[in-house]
Image: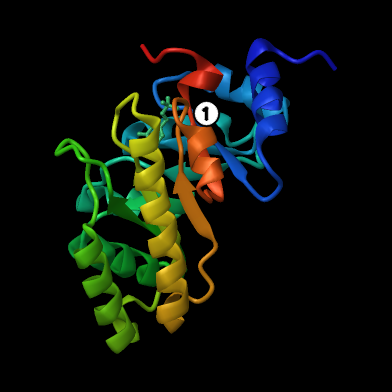
Amino acid sequence: MDLSPIGETIQAIKETLPEGVKLVAVSKYHSAEEIQEAYLAGQRCFAESRVQELLEKEEALRESCPEISWHFIGPLQRNKVKYLIPLVSLIESIDSERLLDEVQRQAEKRSQKANILLELLVAQEDTKQGFSEGELLDLLEQWQRNPERWHSIELRGLMCMASHTKDEEAIAREFARCYQLFQEIKERYPLASNIDTLSMGMSGDYPIAVREGATEVRIGSRIFGDRH
Ligand SMILES: *Cc1c(COP(=O)(O)O)cnc(C)c1O
């Protein structure tokens, strides 16, 4: 079968990824048709950063692309959590305790387990979100002391974004710090002993992230072109 340009790019990226590193196609601002092209090339996992957009695309593609799994990667308001829980396989952008409480509430209501990543702030920019290292460790201490509080939540790992800079060494240091913390919490916290996902690296910096130990890369514009 001839692949579309989107499909060719996906194949080319996949060939550069080591085994065990998962490609998540970030389809935000792109159309359902473009997602379908990627799907036809074998891509199954897609990520969106706005709830409304995800709901619309999920509905549009439910029948034609039944094997899609959706990740959510954007800033998340608590009042939108209820819409995501039934539809997404992973929420990557958990950045506060209150958000975790709401995910717990909605997952429990549906007798479901919600898979999440905790977002770690490693970039030197105030525009980015996430827990600081200290906050992350405090949260895990709490979780460990009182596992009941978030019992409907499965902690799968960490997500981070590096600083927006051309300084590749600075980017590598941020990813390396994230990897180190990922390993530390795996060893230190029984509740995290099964975590398997370190989500880092985007179009501009994913080769660096892969070298620093990412298990998942989130690639948008490199696959779909510029966002309008
Ligand atoms: C948009 C986005 C991406 C993808 O960015 P590209 O540079 O287009 O690859 C990855 N992760 C997050 C959290 C995003 O918001």
Position of 165 relative to 195 (above/below): above
Left or right: 50 as drawn, with respect to 36: left
| Pick the front one: 37 or 129 | 129
For residue 87, say whether it is visible: no
Split into quadrants, the picture shows ligand 1 in the one at top left
Q: Residue 20: x, y in percent?
A: 67, 50
Which amino acid type corresponds to the residue marked 1 in the rendered image? Ala
The local secondary structure at tag 1 comes to helix
Residue reaching furthest bottom?
A: 145
Q: Quadrant of residue 133?
A: bottom left
Left or right: 105 as drawn, with respect to 197: left
Residue at image location 41% in from the left, 71% down from the top: 184
Residue at image location 27% in from the left, 64% down from the top: 100
Disc tally is 1
Quarter holding the N terminus is: top right
| Pick the front one: 124 or 225 | 124
Residue at image location 30% in from the left, 75% down from the top: 140
Q: Quadrant of residue 179?
A: bottom left
Q: Residue 146: x, y in percent?
A: 28, 86
Q: Residue 165: x, y in percent?
A: 30, 27
Residue reaching furthest right?
A: 1
Residue at image location 81% in from the left, 13% down from the top: 2
Position of 123 relative to 97 (above/below): above
User: How many neighbours does mark 1 have within 10 angstroms: few (below 14), some (14-19), or many (20 or more)?
Assistant: few
Q: Residue 25: x, y in percent?
A: 54, 32
| Pick the front one: 55 or 143 | 143
Look at mark 1 in the image and give the residue it sits on.
60
Colouring scheme, one of rainbow, by chain, secondary structure, one colour: rainbow
Left or right: 58 as drawn, with respect to 13: left
Position of 159 relative to 109 (above/below): above
Quarter holding the C terminus is: top left
For residue 106, say whether it is visible: yes
